[in-house]
Amino acid sequence: MSEKLPLIVAHRGASYIAPENTIPAFEIAFQEKADFIEGDFWLTKDNEIVCIHDSNTRRVGNKNIDVKSSTITELKNVDLGIRKGEQFAGTKIPTLQEVLEIIPEQKGLHLEIKDNRENILIRLKEILKESNIPADKIRIISFHRNIIRAAKKHLPEIKAYLIFGWYFSKGNYFKSLTRKLILRKLNTVNGDGVVLFADSYIDEKFVQTLKDKKLDVGAYNVEDAKKAIKFTNCDVDSLTTKSPLMIRKAIETKII
């Protein structure tokens, strides 16, 4: 087991307290000592990249509009904050540029691409070229294998991780079959790592199997101290959580 602690990644920012995928959530996450923030991104009708989880604004906003078929001006008219409390009223959907601007030095971004169209990578390359953030402080992550392949084509200098969701461990799969399915899918992309839903199929042996393939290993949905300590002991490279400060305290003290 490595002596190095995993990086703490704030899932959609400090989304336990602030509206997910917003500047307030990301700023609080950094105040809570997150190493990276994680946000979800789509390409708009007018070729801007915006940070929002769903393909529409219904769940998080005060009105329902489709992200891909709307302009940045239309999307900026949606209020994301009021559902989290009056103190967040008026909070807007941020652009990727706005997210990059608030990342402190030595901190980074797990940039999850929800949009499965390859042209989002072309626009992403343009935006990152104009940004001062170093390539090693960006991770492109996605459930879409075509996006990971396209990321390695358009942005080879940036690490790209394939994500695996809860359905790999919550279905009628044995742990051994879950691991085999993950390895099989990883063999179809030329990625740099994997982000796994935090569940019982992850153990020290499986993490080592992935690392033997020169892959970085992250776990997400890490929302309690017991899980955080378990995966730290398994030598994962990152823990993604809604509550960065709580998880950091857990792994630094190893008190459950």
Image (cartoon, helix red, strand yellow):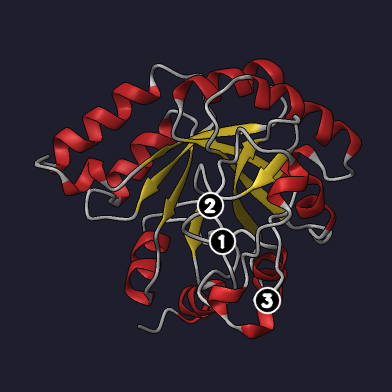
The residue to which callout 2 is attached is: 64
Nearest to the observer: residue 191 or residue 154: 154
The residue to which callout 1 is attached is: 61
Residue type at mark 3?
A: Ala
Q: Is residue 8 visible?
A: no
Residue 134, quarter of the rendered image: top right
Residue type at mark 1?
A: Gly
* In front: label 2 or label 3: 2
Label 2: element kind: loop
Query: Pointer 2 and pointer 1: residues touching (CB < 8 Å)?
Result: yes
Q: Position of residue 142 (x, y in %)?
A: 50, 35
* In front: label 2 or label 1: 2
Residue type at mark 2?
A: Asn
Q: Residue at x 30, y 31 (%)?
A: 182
Label 3: element kind: loop
Q: Position of residue 136 (x, y in %)?
A: 73, 41
Q: Residue at x 57, y 64 (%)?
A: 62
The residue to which callout 3 is attached is: 89
Q: Residue at x 56, y 61 (%)?
A: 61
Query: Pointer 1 and pointer 3: residues touching (CB < 8 Å)?
Result: no
Q: CA distance from mark 2 to mark 1?
A: 7 Å
Q: Residue at x 58, y 70 (%)?
A: 14
Residue 199, quarter of the rendered image: bottom left
